[in-house]
Image (cartoon, rainbow, N blue to C red):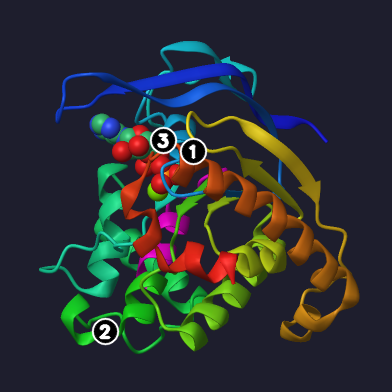
């Protein structure tokens, strides 16, 4: 399959405002993401997952190395590559439909067509009847559905997701995972999920890219060769259990390296990582 993204030896550092030193977030990261695939990026907190996602989105530029999208250097954001954030990022003064319409307005779509398009995507994420509700009238799961509808309404080629379910309870999280998989298999778009929830990554992905502790590089790439279609009971499949224990070991090694290097003190508070080390 053709790569949609190619990263070669990408380096990215930030100036740490606390002590004025430069902090290496990514240290020579190389990877390929294939057109139309569902791929997850996992790694310890602070390993540069969000940085990588923002580079793919074009919000950040590499300090050195190459980052190509469909063969061309990523020079900035593009409506072809949309991001779904953990915090939903909805406008509180706009209704669900108003939020979904917003990016369409930026593309100069006339009002009536915009509304129709927004309602189509609202229905796609099963929020019929909630189009005219404001974010404060919606549950966390519903808000994230609006976020997903808004992202898809732009008809992007790539959907980039940064811990999109982290603020949700487990049942809502599982429902949304299934929902996103359904959308992915019907839409033919490339989905890139950043998560440190291993089960989620295995359940949803066709490939997992495991990052090293900081400075982030690709430690390994694992094909998730599980039977299709993915249903909730796949989590008890022997291959699922095997992949989970193998990836847990590998991720744990990196988390331990981060702790030993004193890289990310907040790591111990990180629920996702505690789950992994159990
Ligand atoms: N804008 C920024 N300014 C300074 N440091 C940053 C910035 N963004 C990220 N970092 C640092 O870079 C490292 C990687 O961050 P991030 O990509 O958010 O990791 P992850 O998403 O894997 O937890 C962290 O140590 C983080 O504190
Ligand atoms: Mg992050």
Q: Is residue 90 magenta?
A: no
Region in magenta? 146-157
Quick one: label 3 or label 1, which is nearer the N terminus? 3
Mark 3, other Cα within 10 Å: few <14 / some 14–19 / many ≥20: many
The one nearer the camera, 258 or 91, is: 258
Q: Determine if residue 276 is in view.
A: yes
At a point 43% along the width and 18% down the height, the residue shown is 62
Give me the C-alpha separation between circle 3 and circle 1: 19 Å
Q: How far from the left and from the top, in percent, is residue 128?
A: 41, 86
- Asked whether mark 1 lies closer than 8 Å to ligand 1, one says no
What residue would you read off at disc 3?
Answer: 51
Q: Secondary structure at mark 2?
A: loop
Q: How far from the left and from the top, in percent, is residue 155?
A: 50, 50
Q: How far from the left and from the top, in percent, is residue 177?
A: 58, 73
Mark 1, other Cα within 10 Å: few <14 / some 14–19 / many ≥20: few
Q: Secondary structure at mark 3?
A: helix
Please determine whether, in this image, residue 167 is positioned above or below residue 218. below
Query: Residue placed farthest to the top in the image?
Result: 64
Q: Is residue 154 magenta?
A: yes
- Asked whether mark 3 lies closer than 8 Å to ligand 1, one says yes
**Residues tagged 1 and 2 counted as in contact (Cβ below 8 A):** no
Label ID, residue 138: 2
Quick one: label 2 or label 3, which is nearer the N terminus? 3
At a point 35% along the width and 63% down the height, the residue shown is 269
Q: Determine if residue 189 is in view.
A: no
What residue would you read off at disc 1?
Answer: 80
Give me the C-alpha separation between circle 2 and circle 3: 30 Å
At a point 72% along the width and 84% down the height, the residue shown is 232
Quick one: label 1 or label 2, which is nearer the N terminus? 1
Badge nearest the viewer, 2 or 3:
3
Give me the C-alpha separation between circle 1 and circle 2: 28 Å
Q: How far from the left and from the top, in percent, is residue 63?
A: 41, 13
């Amino acid at each position: 399959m053709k790569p949609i993204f190619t990263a070669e030896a990408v380096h990215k550092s930030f100036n740490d405002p606390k002590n004025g030193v430069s902090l290496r977030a990514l240290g020579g990261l190389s990877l390929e993401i294939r057109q139309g695939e569902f791929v997850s990026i996992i790694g310890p907190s602070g390993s540069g997952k969000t940085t990588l996602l923002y580079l793919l989105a074009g919000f950040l530029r590499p300090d050195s190395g190459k980052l190509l999208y469909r063969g061309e250097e990523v020079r900035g954001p593009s409506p072809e590559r949309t991001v779904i954030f953990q915090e939903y990022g909805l406008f509180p003064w706009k209704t669900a439909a108003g939020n979904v319409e917003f990016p369409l307005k930026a593309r100069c779509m006339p009002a009536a067509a915009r509304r129709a398009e927004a309602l189509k995507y609202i229905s796609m994420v099963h929020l019929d009847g909630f189009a005219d509700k404001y974010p404060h009238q919606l549950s966390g799961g519903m808000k994230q559905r609006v976020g997903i509808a808004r992202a898809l309404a732009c008809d992007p080629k790539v959907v980039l997701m940064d811990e999109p379910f982290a603020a949700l309870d487990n049942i809502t999280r599982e429902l949304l995972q299934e929902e996103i998989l359904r959308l992915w298999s019907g839409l033919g778009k490339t989905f890139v999920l950043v998560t440190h929830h291993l089960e989620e990554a295995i359940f949803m992905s066709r490939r997992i890219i495991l990052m090293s502790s900081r400075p982030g590089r690709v430690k390994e790439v694992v094909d998730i060769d599980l039977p299709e279609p993915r249903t909730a009971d796949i989590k008890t499949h022997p291959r699922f259990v095997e992949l989970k224990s193998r990836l847990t070991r590998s991720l744990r090694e990196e988390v331990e390296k981060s702790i030993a290097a004193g890289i990310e003190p907040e790591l111990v508070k990180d629920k996702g990582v505690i789950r992994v080390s159990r």
